[in-house]
Amino acid sequence: ACNGTDTGADQGATDAIIVAAGRGERAGAGAPKQYRDLDGEPVLLRSLRGFLTLPDIRRVVVVVRAEDRGLFDAAVAGLGAEYSGRLMSVDGGATRQASVRHGLEALASMASPPAQVLIHDAARPWASAALILRAIAAARTHGAAVPGLAVSDTIKSVDACGQVTATLPRPALRAIQTPQAFRFAAIVDAHRRAVGEPAEFTDDAAIAEWAGLPVHVFEGEAANSKITHPHDFQTPHCQPPAANLIS
Ligand code: CTP
Ligand code: MG
């Protein structure tokens, strides 16, 4: 039996943080990946719009590298006044973890902090409204919740010499995405406590787990992939069938 964690089903406001302060080094030369064009629009504008157009989200904080201010301003210039009024931005940090914390502290310092917060990678422009709504609902029920997909490949751990050390049990594995959703007070507390920890936290769920919070996994989306390498700029659900690639 799988029991949900009773968090008191908080129905207060939900805000979102979009982390966009990375350099995008694996995606190759040119502007950082979140500012590059994807079917006629910057990646960041696509990632952002999914949140700004949902009435369930009160405000959106984008975390931006100081050097990228001009790129950010240009990317959001086309947003209508009805959306830009709910948008704010703060400076990023040296790591994703620090960038998220800057966003959390910005919300914590406001007159009315949110009850829930969604944390999303600017590099995931394909998250659907349905996925975002699932994240909000899951945060209300479980306190900490992240989208995950069953894996189809067999996953093995290897040592530094490339020798297999274990084959992991596939039914229990999930590939984890964003938006990750949390009760605001709990994730702010976890992030503050994690400052200075030597551990490398690659997502916010890992910080929540480290802080002892139970984290629930809800169904992610195959199309919600993260742009990481140059070839990822192709829309995942519009890729040509393999036959076209070899004809
Ligand atoms: N990010 C951030 N601040 C950092 C590092 C990353 O806000 N100091 C953001 C990125 O902009 C991205 C998300 O975290 O939206 C996920 O990180 P990743 O895919 O690793 O992006 P980059 O760090 O930009 O890319 P790379 O690691 O290839 O340089
Ligand atoms: Mg990175």
Image: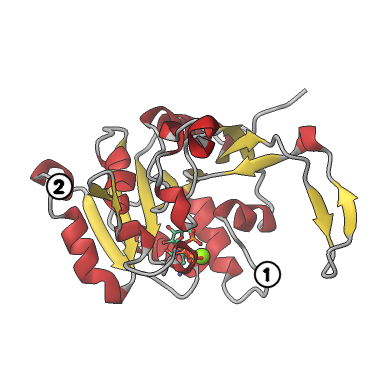
Horizontal placement of 52 versus 213: left or right? left
Horizontal placement of 153 versus 87: left or right? right
Image position, residue 6 (x, y; %): 61, 32
For the point 73% across and 39% down, the residue is 153
Image quadrant occupied by the N terminus: top right
Is disc 1 in contact with disc 2, using a CB cutoff of under 8 Å?
Answer: no
- Distance from the alpha carbon under mark 1 to that under mark 2: 38 Å
Image position, residue 154 (x, y; %): 78, 41
Toward the viewer: 59 or 9?
A: 59
Q: Is residue 9 visible?
A: no
Q: Amino acid at mark 1?
A: Ala
Judged from this view, the residue extending furthest toward the top is 1
For the point 43% across and 73% down, the residue is 93
For the point 59% across and 60% down, the residue is 202
Image position, residue 197 (x, y; %): 64, 73
164 to 86, vertically: above or below: below
Image disc number at residue 199: 1
Eye-nearest disc, 1 or 2: 2
Q: Secondary structure at mark 2?
A: loop
Toward the viewer: 10 or 148?
A: 148
Which scheme is used to colour this image of the protein? secondary structure
Toward the viewer: 113 or 27?
A: 27
For the point 50% across and 30% down, the residue is 241
Image position, residue 88 (x, y; %): 24, 57
Q: Residues within 10 Å of mark 2 (few under 14, many from 20)?
A: some
Q: Judge: label 1 CB < 8 Å from ligand 2.
A: no
N-terminal of the two: label 1 or label 2? 2
Q: Residues within 10 Å of mark 1 (few under 14, many from 20)?
A: few
Q: Amino acid at mark 2?
A: Leu
Q: Secondary structure at mark 1?
A: loop
Which residue is disc 2 drawn over? 79
67 to 171, vertically: above or below: below
